[in-house]
Image (tube, rainbow, N blue to C red):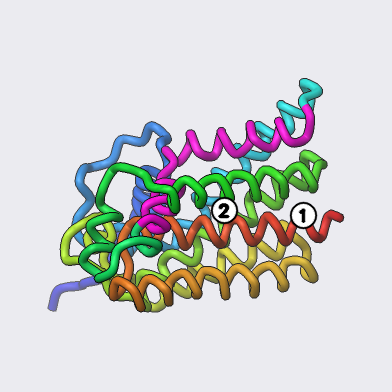
Amino acid sequence: MEDDTPPEGAEIAGWWEELRLALGFLTRLPLALPAPPPPGALAQAGWAFPLVGVVVGLLGGIAYSLAAALQLPALAAALVAIGVTVLLTGALHEDGLADTADGLGGGGSPGQKLAIMRDHHIGSYGVLALLFSVGLRAAALAAIGDGGRVAAVLMAAHALARGGLPVALYVLDPAREDGLGAAAGRPEAATAVIAAGIGVVVALLGLGIVAGVGGVIAAGLTMALVAWGARRQIGGYTGDVLGAIEQTGEIVILLAGAAWAS
């Protein structure tokens, strides 16, 4: 009878490859990855999404501290930090937020809404969504002020927001048969729970227990509301909807951090 036990170190290597896949997909970091990933591989790597958020948030926090050290005003330093995170991610989630706002805000039928979301042109709903997203995040970081606290809250926000994405992949169905969202696949329940758990832990560490619990509850409800709206209007998720879910969670956690700091 053959021994199906994986060789020593294979499990660790698998985790590392999944982390590299998550980093390579969610950021623009120069990682040599096989393209395209096998179907379902991205969902399987979902547990690592919040760890990617920690990396993005940390680098954004470092950018904020460097800008503050150059005596830039707090709002300018906040915009620098947001700009760095956008460059790191290639505006992946911001693009999804804008397309989702245009699609769900316009169009009568689910088919029309999906067609609008796939259109590369940005409409008024998308522009307003981006303005509110950048404006609220910048205002929150400027209100927090302290560089170390900004880094902690940024890591909390990016980790929790990305930790919710595997949960959305698990509970929702793809709104269309093709596209990036459908290709990601459906993660196992354990993967979604681990991702959410990591995100919650990082959020509690970054914000503290009191602000963290309130922020996690508020962010979870807001992300769930976006997911419910997408399922009601277009039947499920797309890659753009996942981006909108991430952005709303990120914004809420940053606002919670700002409220706690004040």
Residue type highlighted by circle 1: Ala
Query: Farthest right residue?
Result: 262
Which numbered disc, 2 or 1, marks the residue that appears first in the sequence?
2
Rendering quarter of residue 141: top right
Question: Principal SS element in the magenta part?
Answer: helix
Disc number placed over residue 258 in the picture, else none: 1
Residue located at (43% from left, 64% from top)? 165
Residue 198 location (% of width, % of height): 56, 65
Let me know if residue 74 is in the magenta part: yes
Q: Which residue is label 2 attached to?
A: 158
Q: Is residue 203 left or right of residue 260?
A: left
Residue 19 location (% of width, % of height): 41, 51
Q: Foreground mark, 2 or 1?
A: 1
Rendering quarter of residue 29: top left
Q: From where the camera sits, is residue 8 visible?
A: no
Q: Is residue 250 above or below residue 89?
A: below
Q: Is residue 158 above or below residue 79?
A: below
Residue located at (27% from left, 55% from top)? 116
**In which quadrant will I find the N terminus?**
bottom left
Residue type highlighted by circle 2: His
Q: Along the line of sight, which residue is nearer the eye, 192 or 87? A: 87
Q: Along the line of sight, which residue is nearer the eye, 174 or 110? A: 110
Residue 3 location (% of width, % of height): 20, 72
Q: Along the line of sight, which residue is nearer the eye, 100 or 161? A: 100
Label 2: how many residues lie within 10 Å, few (<14), some (14-19) or many (20+)?
A: many
Label 1: how many residues lie within 10 Å, few (<14), some (14-19) or many (20+)?
A: many
Q: Is residue 224 left or right of residue 67?
A: left
Q: Is residue 144 left or right of residue 246?
A: right
